[in-house]
Image: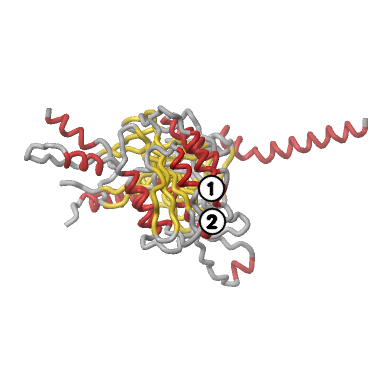
């Protein structure tokens, strides 16, 4: 019995906040059991040299670099059991994207219409301009009223991008359901102009929510700005992907990545308290690219 | 007929050139001159700038600051531990259990098995393995001390 108790806290470092949150809402006995987490769990998918999802990956195909240490011995390796998506499209409606805003809106409308009625997937839409984000629809965006609200949007005002990402991370974290992968799809040029939160705050919030960030760059390709680089760095840091254009293909990529997702677990390589950086790198085929979050925080519970 | 002979000659020349280019790798493989090691650490660090040419050597050209980060690997072999650095941000070593490598002109050439070619890294540091193990043991001891 005791050994079982020893095992459950070792589920996963990324899941620890969830475990603690669940624990706080149920009726627990007065005695609190605490144990140091000793296992790391990472969800990832791979793409090839053409940026297409790779369906079959073996555990011999990759190594994890955790806090600079190369890990090749894994406790478990399996397909991800997340089979549904909680999609939150985040549409930049600020003035700086005015010329590409109609294309972005069409992509979001297409995403809503492509969602399969009756499936476990859900789609929500947020937009942002001025000083704060707005919820266009939550959970079910397939009704005509939601489409009407979306079509009424005009691109104008400042760009509270980072504040919106913090809001979106909180929004998606509160909708967390077992077996459902949370995904933020951001349509923006990446050029924040007014947020109180920094890019670091926004990234931290998205990583903490366990959501993947897919970014579609609405910036002008003929006049590239720093925003594109920010979008790319943020999306890759969460284990998501960055698209220059072709927002219509994002949903297809998200679905393919979901079906090609794996989960690997391994023993914590060192007990250094703080942020552990993460990378997954190929062991033989250098054309493979593995997408996972860029790290986790380890807190030693004694 | 003359054109055919000329084309045949060109193909033969190209084949010989190709063979010559792949000779070091294939000979190394056949003759077993590759040493074996394991990459145990990887991090991104500052790239090592190498200035070539006479002016660079004697003229004291200042080291240019660069924002680019290059992959740095700790490669543990039987007797020696190498710290090697890639020459660009995307120069990677496959992280297989066993890495085949050889020393070549002050550089370390790693055999990239799937691509059947070598990729060369700058050697940043070399250490005897017992000495490196002692350092690692010390680091582990420091890490195991609980924070106050």
Which of the pair A196/A11 is nearer the observer?
Answer: A196
The chain carrying label 1 is A
Residue A222 in sight here: yes
Task: Examine the rendered structure and indicate whether residue B1 appears above or below residue A141.
Answer: above
Picture coordinates of residue B42, whole percent (x, y): 41, 47
Seen at 16% across and 57% down, the residue is B148
Picture coordinates of residue B25, whole percent (x, y): 60, 38
Q: Please say which color scheme the image uses.
A: secondary structure
Neighbour class for label 2 at 10 Å: few (<14), some, many (≥20)?
A: many
Picture coordinates of residue A38, whole percent (x, y): 24, 39
Seen at 83% across and 32% down, the residue is B8
Q: Which residue is mark 2?
A: A97
Seen at 40% across and 33% down, the residue is A121
Which of the pair A261/B80 is nearer the observer?
Answer: A261
Q: Is residue A296 left or right of residue B52?
A: left
Picture coordinates of residue B19, whole percent (x, y): 69, 36
Q: Identify the image quadrant of residue A12.
A: top left
The chain carrying label 2 is A
Which of the pair A152/A296 is nearer the observer?
Answer: A152
Task: Examine the rendered structure and indicate whether residue A269 appears above or below residue B7.
Answer: below
Q: Which mark is residue A131?
A: none
Residue contact at pointers 1 and 2, CB within 8 angstroms: yes
Q: Which residue is mark 1?
A: A104
Task: Examine the rendered structure and indicate whether residue A184 appears above or below residue A84.
Answer: below
Discs 1 and 2 carry the same chain letter: yes
Q: Is residue A104 left or right of residue B145?
A: right
Q: Secondary structure at mark 1?
A: helix
Which of the pair A81/B133 is nearer the observer?
Answer: A81
Total residue callouts: 2
Q: Is residue A300 left or right of residue A109?
A: left
Seen at 21% across and 49% down, the residue is B144
Quick one: which residue is furthest to the right in this view? B1
């Amino acid at each position: 019995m005791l050994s079982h108790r020893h095992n459950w806290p070792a589920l996963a470092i990324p899941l620890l906040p969830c475990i603690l949150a669940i624990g706080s809402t149920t009726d627990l006995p007065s005695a609190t059991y605490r144990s140091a987490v000793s296992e790391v769990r990472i969800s990832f998918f791979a793409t090839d040299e053409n940026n297409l999802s790779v369906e079959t990956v073996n555990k011999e195909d990759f190594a994890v670099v955790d806090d600079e240490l190369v890990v090749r011995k894994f406790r478990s390796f399996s397909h991800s059991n997340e089979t549904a998506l909680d999609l939150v499209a985040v549409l930049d409606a600020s003035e700086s994207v005015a010329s590409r805003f109609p294309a972005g809106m069409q992509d979001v409308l297409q995403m809503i219409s492509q969602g399969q009625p009756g499936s476990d997937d859900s789609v929500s839409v947020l937009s942002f301009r001025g000083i704060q984000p707005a919820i266009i629809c939550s959970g079910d965006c397939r009704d005509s009223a939601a489409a009407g609200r979306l079509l009424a949007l005009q691109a104008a005002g400042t760009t509270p991008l980072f504040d919106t990402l913090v809001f979106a991370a909180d929004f998606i974290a509160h909708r967390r359901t077992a077996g459902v992968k949370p995904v933020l799809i951001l349509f923006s040029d990446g050029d924040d102009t007014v947020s109180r939160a920094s890019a670091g705050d926004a990234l931290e919030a998205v990583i903490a929510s366990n959501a993947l960030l897919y970014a579609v760059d609405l910036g002008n390709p003929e006049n590239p700005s720093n925003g594109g680089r920010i979008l790319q760095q943020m999306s890759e840091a969460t284990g998501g992907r960055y698209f220059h254009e072709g927002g219509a293909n994002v949903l297809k990529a998200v679905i393919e990545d979901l079906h090609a997702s794996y989960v690997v677990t391994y023993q914590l390589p060192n007990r250094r308290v703080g942020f552990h950086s993460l990378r997954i790198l190929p062991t033989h085929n250098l054309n493979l690219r593995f997408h996972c979050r860029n790290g986790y925080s380890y807190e030693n519970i004694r | 007929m003359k054109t055919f002979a000329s084309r045949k000659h060109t193909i033969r020349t190209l084949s010989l050139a190709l063979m010559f280019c792949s000779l070091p790798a294939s000979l190394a493989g056949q003759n077993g001159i590759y040493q074996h090691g394991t990459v145990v650490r990887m991090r991104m660090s500052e790239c090592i700038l190498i200035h070539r040419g006479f002016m660079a050597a004697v003229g004291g050209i200042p080291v240019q600051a660069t924002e680019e980060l290059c992959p740095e690997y700790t490669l543990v072999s039987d007797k020696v531990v190498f710290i090697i650095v890639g020459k660009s941000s995307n120069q990677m070593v496959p992280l297989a259990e066993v890495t085949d490598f050889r020393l070549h002109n002050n550089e370390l050439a790693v055999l990239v098995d799937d691509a059947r070619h070598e990729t060369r890294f700058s050697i940043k540091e070399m250490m005897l393995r017992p000495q490196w193990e002692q350092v690692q043991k010390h680091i582990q001891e420091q890490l195991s001390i609980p924070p106050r």
